[in-house]
Image (tube, helix red, strand yellow):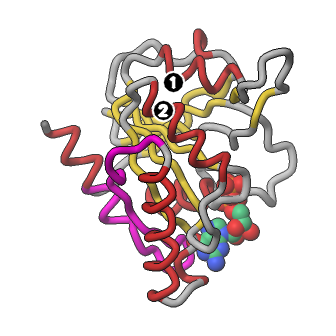
Amino acid sequence: MQIKSAEFIVSNSEVSKCPSEHIPEYAFIGRSNVGKSSLINMITGRNKLAKTSGTPGKTQLINHFKINKNWFLVDLPGYGYARVSKSTKKEFQSFITDYFKQRKALVCTFVLVDSRHTPQKIDVEFMEFLAENEIPFVIIFTKTDKLKPKAITQNIAKYEAEMLKEKFEYFPTYFTSSSANKNGKDDILNFIDSINKD
Ligand code: GDP
């Protein structure tokens, strides 16, 4: 897929205020600093579409971008646990969980995970939340330029083992990416294109 246009539409912290237009929506999410903004800029070929961590005033907002006038790319904030009160069950921030439970046009979510790290509990728990709510998702292992190919393969295998040990019956589809050398761009865009054409 060629990116012919990429327009910022709106930022907000309430799902009810997200755009009402029903076009396919693809969300990008991960822990803060995973490389999400850099990845969004890399795949759209727009250096400043998403604000990278160096940008002051980066806030916890749901950002909608319209791509090629026919689908939304959604930049979601880095997730964290909301405060746990009486219940012992950890919960993610409500505006993030509301987004996933309410956004009907959401087609697929890209969960970004840093390829340098061993499986992190919060990432696995977030994917469990998506699976429990039947939200389709795939994984993107980011920053692969920082590792040798063998180490990337080993870390992905550790992720697979950890997820299968938890509640997952199979390992999700995954991509690898590097915003530094543009690895993953075509695979991710072709994946979106193939779903949009179905
Ligand atoms: P976000 O908080 O998830 O949006 O992360 P950013 O895109 O702002 O990136 C966080 C930091 O990681 C910045 O210093 C980026 O320059 C760096 N970074 C992001 N992606 C890559 C990558 O693919 N390779 C390398 N080497 N650094 C990256």
Indicate the amino acid at tag 2: Leu
Q: Amino acid at mark 1?
A: Phe
Q: Secondary structure at mark 2?
A: helix
What residue is rendered at 60% in x and 33% in y?
A: 63
Q: Quadrant of the N terminus?
A: bottom left
Please, what secondary structure does the residue beneath circle 1 have? Answer: helix
Where does label 2 land, which residue? Answer: 130
Report x, y in % for residue 159. 50, 62
Residue where numbered disc 1 is placed: 100
Q: Is residue 196 left or right of residue 39?
A: left
Residue 84 place in picture, x, y as percent: 82, 24
Q: Nearer the viewer, mark 1 or mark 2?
A: 2
State left or right for residue 184 relative to residue 76.
left
- Count of all numbered marks drawn on residues in the image: 2
Q: Is residue 172 magenta?
A: yes
Q: Which residues are magenta?
A: 167-190
Residue 26 badge: none
Is residue 84 found left or right of 79 in the rendered image? right
